[in-house]
Amino acid sequence: MSFLEQKIRDAHTAGRTALIPFVTAGFPTLDTFWGIIEELDANGADVIEIGVPFSDPVADGPVVEDASRPALEQRVCLNWIMDGPRQRAGHFNAGIVPTGSLYPFLHYWPERL
């Protein structure tokens, strides 16, 4: 069983629906982003999806598109996104999962996937 499935099953066993918020990486600023993730974790998120900003996020809708632009302007990249949880290892109770279009992952990180 994956850790994501376990987080969802744990919530179900506790008699509730799993809380799985989505936040675009680096939004609203690089300095505040990880604090937001820590607040979500401290307030009961079971899994936190960290959206990887993409230059053409039209399929994700206008809210994600509007969050992606400033994140990209701040040069958010997969290394920055993936280093955050590593630097905070053991700090989060929630599962942390990068999500987004497949292209950035394959373009930037194929050997690490």
Image (tube, rainbow, N blue to C red):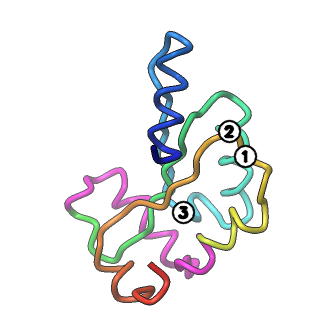
Q: Which residue is mark 3?
A: 25
Identity, as a three-letter code, of the amino acid under mark 3? Ala
Can you give x and y, in whole percent of width and height, for residue 64 in the image? Answer: 37, 55
Residue drawn at 43 percent across, 69 percent down: 53
Q: Please tell me how many numbered marks the rendered image carries.
A: 3
Provide the secondary structure element on which disc 1 rests. Answer: loop
In contact (CB < 8 Å): disc 3 and disc 2: no
Q: Nearer the viewer, mark 3 or mark 2?
A: 2
Asked if labels 2 and 1 touch by Cβ distance under 8 angstroms, the answer is yes
- Which quarter of the image is occupied by the N terminus? top left
**Left or right: 94 as drawn, with respect to 71:** right
- Is disc 3 placed on a helix, strand or loop? loop
Q: Nearer the viewer, residue 11 or 73?
A: 11
- Which region is colored magenta? 59-81
Q: Residue at x 48, y 44 (%)?
A: 4
Q: For the residues marked 3 and 2, what is the alpha-carbon distance in whole angstroms?
A: 15 Å
| Other residues around mark 1 within 10 Å, as few (<14) / some (14–19) / many (≥20) | some
> In the picture, residue 109 is in which quadrant?
bottom left
Q: Does the magenta portion include 34?
A: no
